[in-house]
Amino acid sequence: MAQLGKRLLPLFDRVLIERFVPEVKTKGGIMIPEAAAGKVNSGTVVAVGPGGRTEDGKTLAPAVKEGDKVLLPEYGGHKIEFNSKEYYLFRENEILGKWSE
Amino acid sequence: MAQLGKRLLPLFDRVLIERFVPEVKTKGGIMIPEAAAGKVNSGTVVAVGPGGRTEDGKTLAPAVKEGDKVLLPEYGGHKIEFNSKEYYLFRENEILGKWSE
Amino acid sequence: MAQLGKRLLPLFDRVLIERFVPEVKTKGGIMIPEAAAGKVNSGTVVAVGPGGRTEDGKTLAPAVKEGDKVLLPEYGGHKIEFNSKEYYLFRENEILGKWSE
Amino acid sequence: MAQLGKRLLPLFDRVLIERFVPEVKTKGGIMIPEAAAGKVNSGTVVAVGPGGRTEDGKTLAPAVKEGDKVLLPEYGGHKIEFNSKEYYLFRENEILGKWSE
Amino acid sequence: MAQLGKRLLPLFDRVLIERFVPEVKTKGGIMIPEAAAGKVNSGTVVAVGPGGRTEDGKTLAPAVKEGDKVLLPEYGGHKIEFNSKEYYLFRENEILGKWSE
Amino acid sequence: MAQLGKRLLPLFDRVLIERFVPEVKTKGGIMIPEAAAGKVNSGTVVAVGPGGRTEDGKTLAPAVKEGDKVLLPEYGGHKIEFNSKEYYLFRENEILGKWSE
Amino acid sequence: MAQLGKRLLPLFDRVLIERFVPEVKTKGGIMIPEAAAGKVNSGTVVAVGPGGRTEDGKTLAPAVKEGDKVLLPEYGGHKIEFNSKEYYLFRENEILGKWSE
């Protein structure tokens, strides 16, 4: 996939998310990304679209913002790779919840 | 699954529920969680989203609140594990009813 | 199924119904619940939710009330057991009609 | 099916219909219900619900009334038996038309 | 099908149509209904319902009237026989167009 | 199919289109309709219905007019033959675009 | 496909897009279109329709404009060839996002 080194502005109610990398502690306590950990269903919001549009054309303020830690559904979303990274695009309404401290 | 030790704020009309653990009385009356009891379709509301959004963008007050004992449908919902516990996320409209004293 | 000995308050437009027990008259006229009578599609309304909610959030008064004798469709509904009894939860719009004296 | 000897009040936009019994003339002109005549797709309206409800909760006046002779679609409807008779429940919008003298 | 010798008043936005009988000219120019001509997708409007009803209960004036020659889709419609004739009932929105002189 | 030698007035938001005939240039430059050229997805608008009707009964002005050259989707549409010609009926919303000089 | 040498004006909320050609750098750094690179899911907006129409007939301003670099979904869209080039038509709501410098 040609690296575009740019920023992606999601359209409408779409949200760009970078999934957490699953960390695995070895016996010695060293944290190493566990390739076999399988998919982690949480991630950080990287970019948010302007918001969904009502049938009448009004734009609704998004319910998440950049930096939010969010919980994703098991399935769905578009997988995208650019800037040598892997991202996911979900519709706002597909996001299950936000993690708070 | 990395334990996040945080709180999950459901989005929109989603509701976070912890299912009751099925209790089994042995002959001696001792209550032990019955692994084989199968799924219990009731649980306690742990967190509630802000509420569903109408087509026009208005947010509707949720019909359940934290602490409510609710009856869940046999199927559906997202199963989530964090803080070493198992939770379920349902849409408000999927919840069948509330148990009252 | 753990007996909760409580009351179930259906949510939104859901209605809790206890089906009639099919009666069978033997030659001597004795009425005994006929296990083989198959499902009876009528029952008594035990509890009614607050009513369905319009797209705009308005709650619509339910069309049935506690004590009504109602006719149910052949299929559909959620089967629930509590207080050692069997109940069914239907959406108001699934109920076919009301029996009147 | 236990005979309830009562009246059924259809809910919302449902209509209770008793199908015509297909008549068959033998050579001698005698009219006998033809068991093999197959289903007749016409019948008489026996009871009408209050009417369908709009999304906003308004009830719409029904388009048929008791005694109307109506044409039914080949399929669909709920078949019900009570008072030793067979009836059909259709949604108003499923009824094809009214027969007029 | 018992001949009712009556008129059918379609309900709502339904339209009663009698299909043209396909004519076949033999070499001698004689026009004979061609049984094998297959279905003709045009016909004459015999009766029109009051019109479709909006979600809000308003009735919309029909777009066709008795006597119109109309073009029908290949499939769909209810086939009905009465008064020893064959008719078709279509929803107004299924009719493709009107033939004009 | 009986030739009706008439004009077809599409109903509602339907549009009558005559596809371009695919032209094939032989080496000598002669243009001959290429029977094997396969379907051409462009054509000329021959007739336009009054326009689609909103849920509330308002008619919306059509977005194409007679004589427009339009691009059609690969599939869909009703194929019709009359006046010894082949036409296609599409809903306005199915038409992909208009060719401009 | 006959070359029409014209411009295509998409209808309603459709957007005409020319996909980027995937570039492949050989060891010597020469950029050659990589036939085997497979589909690139990004492209440039070539033409935009007037905008989608609400149920009530209002036209909504498009969210993309000519020259925008956009990210496309893996599937969907109509593939079109004219002026010896390959284009894709997507509905505005199918476009995932815009690339910004």
Image (cartoon, coloured by chain):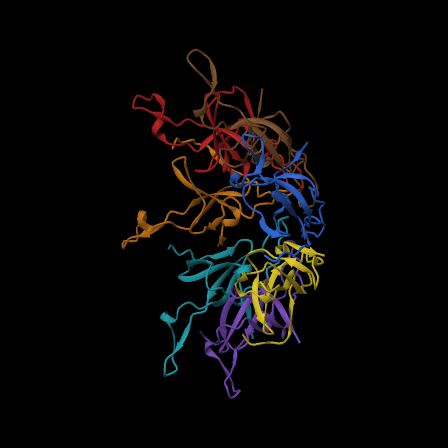
Chain colours: A orange, B cyan, C purple, D yellow, E blue, F brown, G red
Image quarter of the N terminus of chain C: bottom left
Number of marks in picture:
0
The residue furthest bottom is C28
Near-viewer residue (F4 or D60): F4
Q: Residue at x 57, y 37 (%)?
A: E32
Q: Residue A51: give x, y in percent of width and height.
A: 57, 43
Near-viewer residue (B37 or D28): D28
- On screen, residue B40 versus residue E9, left or right, reads left
Q: Residue G71: give x, y in percent of width and height.
A: 47, 34
Q: Residue A74: give x, y in percent of width and height.
A: 42, 51
Answer whether residue B64 is visible to the viewer in this image.
no
Near-viewer residue (B32 or A99): B32
- On screen, residue E101 versus residue G65, left or right, reads right
Answer whether residue B37 is visible to the viewer in this image.
yes
Near-viewer residue (F83 or G36): F83
**Quarter of image, res C63:** bottom right
Image quarter of the C terminus of chain C: bottom right
Q: Is residue A9 above or below residue D93?
A: above
